[in-house]
Image (tube, rainbow, N blue to C red):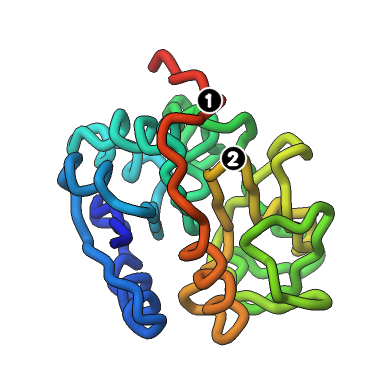
């Protein structure tokens, strides 16, 4: 069973529909016990960084997410769900992220006629091909909807794309995965990425993550 964390994220139903298409049972939930008992966990997200962090705090989900990561339950952040894993965002100055990974969220510069938000298909490049991208070849196209992008430490970056700037499009550390694009909206490529995530085994109690003191 995959737990899809419910915090009014906006794209929970589309993630659920993609998992159903793949024959994978899932539940949309904000219950800590259900989340921590799941085989895998997905943190979706569409919307404002500050509002999202406020909702996670209000529902008592910040500690639950950190606990998932510390237990090495396979965990996938999608779009805003990726951004929340980091330290903070230019979208919401003064709002602290989850601080699970080091990096900042920057605004895509609206220069050279680029439209912001970035909405559409872009190809991925693989500086270090992670487990989410097994059985994919070349530079596959995936679907993005975002105005802000990740600038992370290079050692966790598994995919990049270019849209005016170099965007860190996917990261991996241990059993923690995240992508700025929407695999649930990325046709066959996205379904393969989700299949790869579904195959990641749960490995209880072997994490190397210190729990953030926040």
Q: Sequence-wise, which precedes: disc 1 or disc 2?
A: 2
Furthest residue in direction top, as rendered: 213
User: In the image, residue 58 lies at what x, y percent?
Assistant: 19, 35
What is the quadrant of the C terminus in the image? Answer: top left
Quarter of the figure with residue 141: bottom right
Q: Which mark is residue 117?
A: none
Q: Residue under circle 2? A: 174
Location of the N terminus by quadrant is bottom left
All told, the count of numbered labels is 2
Residue topped by disc 1: 209
Q: Is residue 141 visible?
A: yes
| Residue at the (49%, 39%) spot, across then down | 85
The secondary structure type at the circle numbered 1 is loop
Residue 31 image offset from top left, x and y in percent: 15, 45
In the figure, residue 86 lies in which quadrant? top right
Q: Residue at x 32, y 43 (%)?
A: 51
Along the horizontal axis of the image, is 85 left or right of 53? right
Task: Compare residues 197 and 84 and report the one nearer the observer.
Answer: 197
């Amino acid at each position: 069973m995959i737990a899809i964390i419910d915090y009014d994220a906006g794209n929970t139903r589309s993630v659920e529909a993609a998992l159903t298409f793949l024959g994978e049972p899932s539940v949309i939930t904000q219950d800590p016990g259900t989340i921590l008992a799941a085989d895998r966990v997905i943190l979706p997200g569409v919307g404002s960084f500050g509002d999202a962090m406020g909702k996670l705090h209000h529902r008592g989900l910040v500690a639950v997410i950190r606990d998932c990561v510390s237990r090495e339950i396979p965990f996938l952040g999608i779009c805003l769900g990726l951004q929340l894993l980091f330290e903070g965002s230019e979208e919401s100055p003064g709002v602290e992220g989850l601080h699970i990974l080091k990096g900042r969220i920057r605004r895509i510069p609206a220069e050279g006629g680029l439209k912001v938000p970035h909405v559409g298909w872009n190809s991925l490049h693989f500086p270090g091909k992670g487990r989410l991208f097994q059985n994919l070849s070349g530079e596959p196209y995936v679907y993005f909807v975002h105005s802000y992008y990740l600038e992370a430490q290079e050692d966790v970056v598994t995919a990049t794309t270019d849209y005016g700037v170099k965007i860190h499009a996917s990261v991996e550390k241990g059993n923690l995965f995240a992508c700025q694009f929407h695999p649930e909206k990325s046709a066959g490529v996205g379904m393969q990425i989700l299949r790869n995530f579904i195959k990641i085994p749960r490995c209880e109690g072997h994490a190397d993550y210190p729990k953030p003191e926040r």
